[in-house]
Every structure is written in C-alpha cells, then in structure tokens.
C-alpha cells in the first residue's frame, strides 16, 4: 500500500494540490488505507512531502488535530511493515502522521522538522529574519537526523538535486524501499508493532555537540 503527499511542480499544480498540505479528510483516508493494508497483510510505504497539515479554519472545524493524532495512532497499531521516505519536506505533525514508521529514509537534501525555521524564529526571537539561526538549531537535515537516530537511511541524490535526475532518484528510492522491506520481511506483527514503538520511545536519547 503506497500513501503519499503530492505537492505539485509549478504554481498551478501546487495551488491545485494545496501545496501538499493535507486536510482532515486526507488523514482519514490514509487511516482507512492503513486499516485495509493491515487486514490483507500488505506492507505500507509512505512518501512524505509536506510543509505541514493545512491550518485553515475549515480544516480546524472538521477536526484537523484529531485526524493527525488518529493517523499517528494508526501507524503505531498496524501489524505490517511500515516504511516512510521523506522525499522533499517533512513538516510538523502533518508529516509525522505518515512517518511513524519502522524504517524512515530521507533524500539527501530533504528536511524533516517539527516547525519551519521561519516559524521557529518567530516564536523564539519574535523575528522571522533569524531563520538561519533557527534552521541550525532545529537540526533538520538528513545528516543530523541520522546521527540523532530519528531516521535510518539517507538516499543519495544526483548532482544538483533530485529534480536534476528524476529517473535516478526514483530508482534510488525504489532500491532503498526494497532493502528496508527485506529487513522487515518475515517479522511477526507483534514484533513490528513493538519495534516501531521502541524506535519513537528511543528518540532523544542521542545528542549532537552544539
């Protein structure tokens, strides 16, 4: 079962796809698909590329926070292999709702963070211009997150970034997913659930020198 965000690749397609920001209905759809995969014993692969869940008034009225929480909970419950790849931007709970997985990989130049650097700077320093300091403090790069134990694998991109070599990037992601699926093949549902939960309980136990 493959579930993912689609952000678009130009202004028109990005507006049409809401810049990859899912509404509550999107997370509820993901929950139904994960349930189906669990019922039929299908591994789940999620492709994450979102600045975060859509924060609009209508989304809040329809239970955006509850939908994100339920999706994250469902990730922790299913007894099949769950693999997540951050293919561009992994922002906030909107990304975690898809990425609470047994194995998490990131493209070499992608980012994964609890908040955008601009948002972090606005909260901490009341000044969005301090976004560079915020980005450094957030440790949002694939390299830092691997050292911290948040992700398991970095997928190399072509010179100049994934957009410069789409076929090579797709092939590299496919090979990484295949390798991670093989690592989890044959594991019992109870082991998969325990492994996934322990992975997230262990986060924060590793640190980086400032």
Image (cartoon, grey):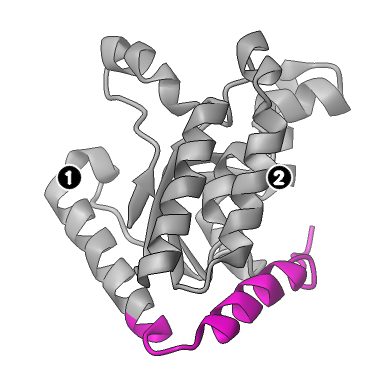
Q: Are marks 2 and 1 in contact (CB under 8 Å)?
A: no
- Residue 22 visible? The answer is no
Q: Nearer the viewer, residue 34 or 209?
A: 34
Please name the residue that numbered disc 1 is placed on.
166
Q: Secondary structure at mark 1?
A: helix
Q: Nearer the viewer, residue 175 or 193?
A: 193
Q: Nearer the viewer, residue 123 or 182?
A: 182
Percent x, y for residue 54?
Answer: 57, 22
Give the position of the C terminus as an image quadrant: bottom right
60 is within the stretch colored magenta: no
Percent x, y for residue 31?
Answer: 51, 47
Q: Is residue 49 above or below residue 201?
A: above
On the picture, is 88 further left or further right than 56?
left
Percent x, y for residue 33?
Answer: 41, 50
Determine the residue positioned at 46% across, 66% down: 82
Determine the residue positioned at 58% across, 29% down: 53
Give the position of the N terminus as an image quadrant: bottom left
Q: Magenta region: which residues?
A: 182-210
Q: Secondary structure at mark 2?
A: helix
On the picture, is 35 further left or further right than 194?
left
Picture quadrant where residue 78 is located: bottom right
Please name the residue that numbered disc 2 is placed on.
138
On the picture, is 26 further left or further right than 97?
left
Picture quadrant where residue 176 is located: bottom left
Q: Characterize the local packing of mark 2: few (<14), some (14-19) or many (20 or more) Cα atoms within 10 angstroms.
A: some
205 is within the stretch colored magenta: yes
Q: Is residue 171 above or below residue 79?
A: above
Q: Is residue 189 above or below residue 204?
A: below
Q: Characterize the local packing of mark 1: few (<14), some (14-19) or many (20 or more) Cα atoms within 10 angstroms.
A: few
């Amino acid at each position: 079962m493959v579930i993912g965000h689609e952000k678009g690749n130009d202004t028109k397609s990005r507006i049409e796809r809401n810049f990859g920001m899912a509404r509550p209905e999107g997370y509820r759809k993901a929950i139904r698909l994960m349930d189906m995969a669990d019922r039929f014993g299908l591994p789940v692969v999620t492709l994450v590329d979102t600045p975060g869940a859509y924060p609009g008034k209508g989304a809040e009225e329809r239970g955006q926070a509850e939908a994100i929480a339920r999706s994250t909970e469902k990730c922790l419950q299913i007894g099949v292999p769950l693999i997540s790849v951050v293919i561009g931007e992994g922002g906030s709970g909107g990304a975690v709702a898809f990425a609470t997985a047994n194995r998490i990989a990131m493209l070499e130049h992608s980012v994964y963070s609890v908040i955008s650097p601009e948002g972090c700077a606005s909260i901490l320093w009341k000044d969005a211009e301090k976004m560079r300091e915020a980005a450094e403090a957030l440790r949002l790069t694939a390299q830092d997150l691997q050292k911290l134990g948040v992700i398991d694998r970095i997928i190399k991109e072509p010179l100049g970034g994934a957009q410069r070599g789409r076929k090579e990037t797709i092939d590299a992601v496919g090979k990484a997913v295949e390798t991670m699926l093989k690592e989890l093949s044959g594991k019992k549902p109870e082991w998969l659930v325990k492994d996934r939960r322990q992975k997230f309980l262990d986060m924060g136990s590793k640190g980086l020198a400032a």
